[in-house]
Image: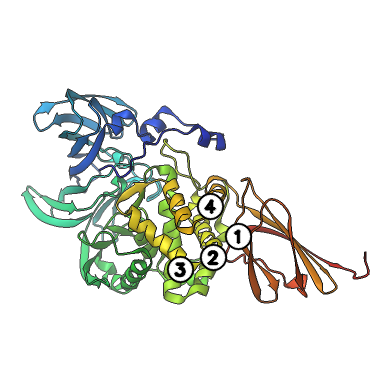
Amino acid sequence: MKRTALFLTLSSLLFTQQPQMTFTRADTLRGTLSPARSCYDVTYYDLDVRIDTMKAPITGSNTIVFHVVNDFDVMQVDLFENMNVDSLVLDGTERATYTREFNAVFVKLPKEVKVGSMHSLQFFYSGTPQEATNPPWGGGFTWTHDKAGNPWIVVTCEGLGASVWWPTKDHPSDEPDSMAISITTRTGMDDVSNGRMRTKKDLGEGWTQFNWFVSYPINNYNVTFAIGKYSHFHDTHRSKDGDTLSLDYWVMQYDLARARTQFKQVKPMMQCFEDFFGKYAFYRDGYKLLQTPHLGMEHQSAVAYGNDYVQGYRGTASSPAGIKFDFIIIHESAHEWWGNAVSAADHADMWIHESFGAYAEAVYVECRWGYDEAMKYVNGKKPNVRNDRPIQGPYGVNKSGSGDMYDKGQLVLNTLRHAIGNDKLWWEIVLEIQNRFRYKAINADEIFSLVNEKTGRDWSSFFEQYFKKSSGPKLEVTVSKKADSTTIRYRWRAEVQGFAMPVKITDAKGKWITIVPTNMWQMMQVAKLDPAKFRVAEDQFYIETSIRRTYIDPNRK
C-alpha cells in the first residue's frame, strides 16, 4: 500500500548542499521511486521461506499482490544480486521473464497490465543471504549459537534493505496493508516473527512451519524472524479506553529469571508512551520483546532485545537518569510509534524515526521522574554530537543523514519545544503528528508544515538550520554594566539567513525572559544586573554561545 503521494526524485539542490557526496547507478536504483516502481502499489505480501539451522542456502517465495497505478509490462522488484531468481509467475498461471541490474530485478510480464486492475506476482528464489558483519548496523543474517550451544539465527537489515533476504519493492514509501510470514525451520526450534502466530505445522522429515500474520502496514526492513530455543512468558497492558494489549516475551531459558525482572519496565513505558504519543498502534498484532544475539532493533510488534538485562546502554549512560532504565527496551519500543506507526517515505528522513525515537527516551524520563531529570538526560547527550553532516540526508539514493540524528536530533526537538515556549501546545503537536500520519509514510516537510500550522508561525529557518546544515546557530552576547544600568547586545550567527529563533536569557538574577535575536545586533537595557549573573538557558536550547562581560567606569563618557 502506497503510504505517500509524493514521488521523490534526486534533488540537485540537496547535492549542492553536500558536494562531498557521490552516488552511483546502484544507489539510484535502490533509492529512487522510479517509473518501474511507481507504476504499482503493493497491497499484500505472502512470504514463505525455509531456513535451516545450519549456515545453508535458504529457499522460498514471496507473492506480491499489487494494484496497477499506471499501465505497464515491466516492474522493478528488488533482491540482492547474490540471490537466485528461480521463477516468476503472474496471477498464478503465466510465466514472466526478467533482467537484472545490481540488486534490481526488472520483471517483464507476459502482458501489459492496466491501470486500476489487481494482480499477483509469485517470486520464487534461493541463495545464501549476506552475513551480518556487525549487527544490527552491518546487516544481514546472523548465524550463531546461544550459551547452551543451540542454533540462533536472526536477521537485521535497516538501511541495507529487506531485499538482502527476500524479494520486495524495497522502497520505504510503499508498504503492504497486511502480510503473511511463513518460516520453516528444523523441528525442535522456535521462530518468532511479526504479528500473530496463526498456526504451527509439523511438515514431517524434521521440518516445522510457523505461520504469522501482520494485520497492519509494515516497513519491509521490519519484517523479521528469530530462530532459537526460546522460553516464553506473557503479560497484558490495559489502555485507558479499556483495550487489552498482549505482551509476550521470548527469551533464552537461562535468562528467564532476569527477563521476568527486567521486562517489568515495559508496562510503565507503554503507559507513558500512550499518554504522550497516543495509543499503541498495533493492538491486534500485540507487542513482543524477544531476546537476540545483537543489541536491538525496532522490528514491528517483535522488538529485538540484546542489552544483557542491564540498565542504560550496555550498562552505561551519559547522565544519572540514563541508568534508571534499560535503554534498548525504551528506545527500540519507542520506534513502534516513531518509525513503525509514522514512517519516513525516503531514507533521507530517517531522522523522523531516530530523532523522535531518541527524544522519546527523554519523554519517558520526564513521565517517570520529572522535567528536571529529563533536562539532565537530554543535556547529557551534548558531548556525543559531532556536527559532521546534516541530520537530513539526500533524497532518492537510500542515504540517511548524520548519525547525529540520534543525540543531536533529541536536543533539537527539545530546543523546538522550548522555542515554541508553550508546553501544552508542544504536546498537542507531538500527538497530532501521530494522529495525522499514523500508518503513513511521510517526508520532513509534512512535519515542518504541521508545526507551522499548529503554532501559527513560520519555523522554516529553524528547520533549515538544524536539519539541513551541519552546525547549529551561535548566540553572540555582550553584557556591559555602567553604574546601575546594564546593556545587553545580542545577535545570531547562523548559516541560514533570517534565522530568528526565540531564546531565554536572564534580565535579573533568577528571572528569565524570552528574546528573539536576528542576524542584526539588537540592544536592551536592564537595571542592576551583574554581568557575572547573566545566563542563557543552554539546558533548554541546543546552541553555541559567546558571552562577553564588561564593567564600565561610571565616569567614562
Q: Nearer the viewer, residue 257 or 303?
A: 303
Label 4 SS: loop
The amino acid marked with disc number 3 is Lys
Quarter of the rendering occupied by the N terminus: top left
Residue at 33%, 71% (x, y): give it.
Answer: 271
Q: Is residue 101 above or below residue 48?
A: above
Q: Position of residue 501 (x, y in %)?
A: 60, 56
**Observer able to see residue 362:** no
Is residue 463 toward the left or the right of residue 398 in the image? right
Badge 2 element: loop
| Location of mark 4 (residue) | 459
Question: In the displayed image of the protein, which residue is found farthest to the left?
Answer: 204
Mark 2 surroundings: few (<14), some (14-19) or many (≥20) residues within 10 A = some
Eyeballing the image, is 414 above or below 227? below
Q: Which residue is mark 2?
A: 421
| Image spot of residue 4 (x, y percent) | 33, 43
In this rendering, position of residue 187 left or right of residue 15:
left
Q: Nearer the viewer, residue 399 or 10?
A: 10
